[in-house]
Image (tube, grey):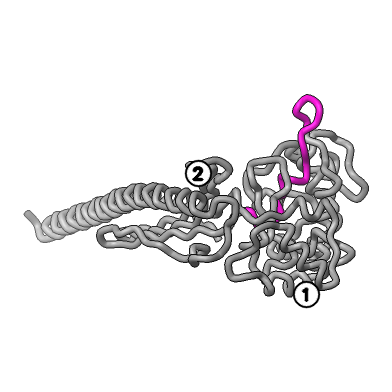
Amino acid sequence: MRAGERGAALLTVLLLVAVIAVMAATALERLRLSTRLAANAVALDAARGYAYAAETLATRRVTTLMQQARDRVALTGGWSGRPFGLPIPGGTATARVTDGGNCFNLNGLVTFGFGDAYLVKTQALTRFQRLVRLLRVPGGDGIATATADWLDSDDDPLPGGAENEAYRGYRTGGTLMADVSELRAVKGVSPEAYKILRPWLCTLPVAQESVININTLLPEQAPLLAMLLPDTMGVAQAQAALLRRPPGGYVSKDQFWAQVASGGGTADVAATQQTGVTTKWFALRIDVVNGGAELHEEGLIDARTLPVRLATRQWGDVP
């Protein structure tokens, strides 16, 4: 073999070695990625199983709380927001329960009408308008009426509201919201407005206004109480009333409103009907870390009947 031919053969061999090396490296990288994905999937499946176990533990605790509390749920015992853990190997699973009814239920803006149609509930709309004013939400009144139009079954917009013709490419829901995030699709709801409103809202799976538990409502949640009395109670007054709450809570809502009246405040029948001393909905938050996998869950516990049950759950990057 001539010298030039030997050089060409050597170059060919080197090229083959290089190609094989690249193919081997690619195969090894894919194998490593597949192994990592499989491990993550196993860890995530295990984390989901631990979350289910935490749900069971939480619902049992809430059932016990309701059985012991009977007709009055207060903050005594420190149950609200207190984390309780589920022991798992090589990780952590933590659950927290809070009052899930101390919020403005967007689905309460409507009520059932003839033929299962959803009709706007004027009283609830007025309260929502009052809340957005108290929170100083930009475009608040328009957001309130547009939200009511989004939920109701007809195509006739309320004054200042928005029905199908106000949207491009999609129609109003015409039914209850499954999650507060749906509010972002409503006309007038800017990112700023949504950020302000989000902590005060919920979407309970019923077309009813949420009953505020005056025994678990925190002083910083005073706007939810003040919105019930638009002309006679401000946020500062509502906060002061909550700070005067007995350590064990009120025996009845009448006792609370009597104290409000003794301090110079007034109440009407509609306002008192939207308050109570017990809780029918509890919010559940679960955080699981297992083998490098993280799982977050938000749930809603229905405590209207015993034993309580988990009504909804949401996985993912929940706030």
Q: Which residues are magenta?
A: 101-117
> Mark 2 = which residue?
308
Q: Quadrant of residue 178?
A: top right
Q: Quadrant of residue 264?
A: bottom right
Q: Amino acid at mark 1?
A: Ala
The residue at 83%/57% (across/down) is 129
Q: Position of residue 107 (x, y in %)?
A: 71, 45
> Mark 1 = which residue?
236
Question: Mark 2 and mark 1: span between their CA atoms?
Answer: 35 Å
The crowd level at tag 1 (other Cα within 10 Å; few <14, some 14-19, many 20+) is some
The residue at 88%/42% (across/down) is 157
The residue at 85%/40% (across/down) is 165
Considering the numbered disc 2 on the image, is that residue within a helix, a strand or a loop?
loop
Considering the numbered disc 1 on the image, is that residue within a helix, a strand or a loop?
helix
Count the labels in the image. 2
Disc nearer the start of the sequence (2/1): 1
Q: Is residue 20 magenta?
A: no
Q: Position of residue 1 (x, y in %)?
A: 6, 54
Q: Position of residue 311 (x, y in %)?
A: 54, 42
